[in-house]
Image (cartoon, helix red, strand yellow):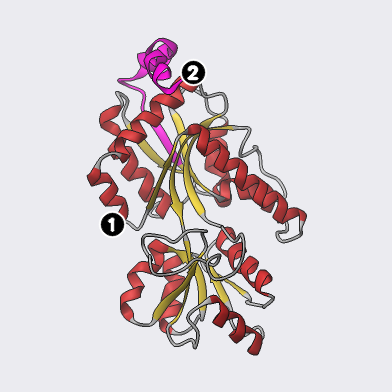
Amino acid sequence: MTSRRALLAAPLMLPALARAQSSRPIRIIVPYAAGGGTDILARALAEAMRPSLPSPIVVENRAGAAGVVGSEAVARAEPDGHTLCAVVSTHVMNKHAMAQIPFDPLRDFSPVAMLSRSTFVLAAMASLPFNDIAGLRAHAQANPTRLSTGSTEALSSFIGQELARRLGIETPDVAYRAGSQLMTDIVAGHLPLGWTTTASATPHMTTGRAKVIAVSTATRTPFFPDVPSVQEQGVADFDLSGWVALLGPARLPDAVAARLFSAVETAYSDQAFRQRLVALGIEADLRPPAAAAEALRREDRIWAAARAAGHIQPQ
């Protein structure tokens, strides 16, 4: 069914949804703590989608177990379009990084939209005597294990250790609870390097005590257009990033997914909304259900290969 036909058919195919419009809200569950980047994006999107949908939209935080608690609630919900979740790329990674989770991150969910790309940047103390990946490698080889690298969650930790593996160096991982804490330590001179998001790094670039020497994606980010990617700096096929996706339960009817994506697309077409995302340090990357599903499958292949190679160990 084409997107246009799906939208035209939606009122006929969704009588339960239509009858409940005025009283039953659409819930977007954010399976992470309030105030984080995903929560901020979900709340901004809910506000922007509201004029396009007859149902009210509420955002609910259900944090716990790296997103598993809130995501499980959506996996078990009725596939009627009233329960969604906004998840990050660790939603897929958890399948390979955890010994067991109570759902399959692909089979038990229906993609509605890819919302944003989370480019990770390699931030460094400004006083370090290098400004690129070649300099990092040379310095680390001359100073074994002296260049610890901060991270804030499983993905940024993996990016740091994967780069070290590819460069043939050691950069011990230092775990932080938040990107703001990581950047504070870099600026203060307590941490030499750290992988964090553009949103966390940007506010600290005006201090003169921090710099960015690479980005994790194959292409540059508009937030740091002058900073080359790791791949540009000679590390082939290095393309790791986070993302935020909007998902519903498995077996969500195509017409429901199409109607929801239409509301998301309308929100993204609003210039004020896009400017708000830029101000928040969020890199818009809107993709429809089919493309979002392919992105999840690609993510699954990446982590399956990493686990098979022993680069991540289920905990």
Please indicate whether residue 206 sits to the left or right of residue 186 in the image: left
Q: How far across and how far down the image is residue 21, in percent? A: 33, 20
Closer to the camera in the image, 73 or 44: 44
Q: What stretch is highlighted in magenta?
A: 1-29
Residue 20 lies within the magenta run: yes
Give yes or no for contact between labels 2 and 1 (Cβ–Cβ under 8 Å): no
Vertical relation: 97 (above or below) 48: below
Which of the numbered marks, if any, corresponds to residue 101? Answer: none
| Nearer-the-camera pick, 116 or 168 | 168
Query: Can see residue 178?
Result: no
Magenta region includes residue 58: no
Q: In this view, does 31 lie above or below 124?
A: above
Q: What element carries label 1?
A: helix
Give the mark nearer the N terminus: 2 vs 1. Answer: 2
Q: Residue lying farthest left?
A: 272
Counting from the top left corner in percent of width and height, residue 178 is at: 46, 64
Residue 8 in sight: yes
Residue 107 location in percent, x, y?
63, 33
Which residue is found at the position 51% from the left and 59% from the top? 217
* Disc 2: which residue: 1
**Quick one: SS at disc 2?**
loop
Kind of residue at disc 2:
Met
- Rounded to the nearest angstrom, the CA distance separating label 2 from label 1 is 37 Å
Q: Mark 1 points at which residue?
A: 279
Q: Residue 46: x percent and y percent?
A: 33, 38
Please give left or right for residue 227 compared with residue 155 in the image: left
Tell which of 205 and 168 is nearer to you: 168
Category of crowding for the residue at label 2, using alpha-carbon neighbours closer than 10 angstroms: few (below 14), some (14–19), many (at least 20): few
Q: Residue at x 36, y 17 (%)?
A: 20
If the image is split into quadrants, where does the C terminus sit? Answer: bottom right
Q: In which quarter of the image is residue 10?
A: top left
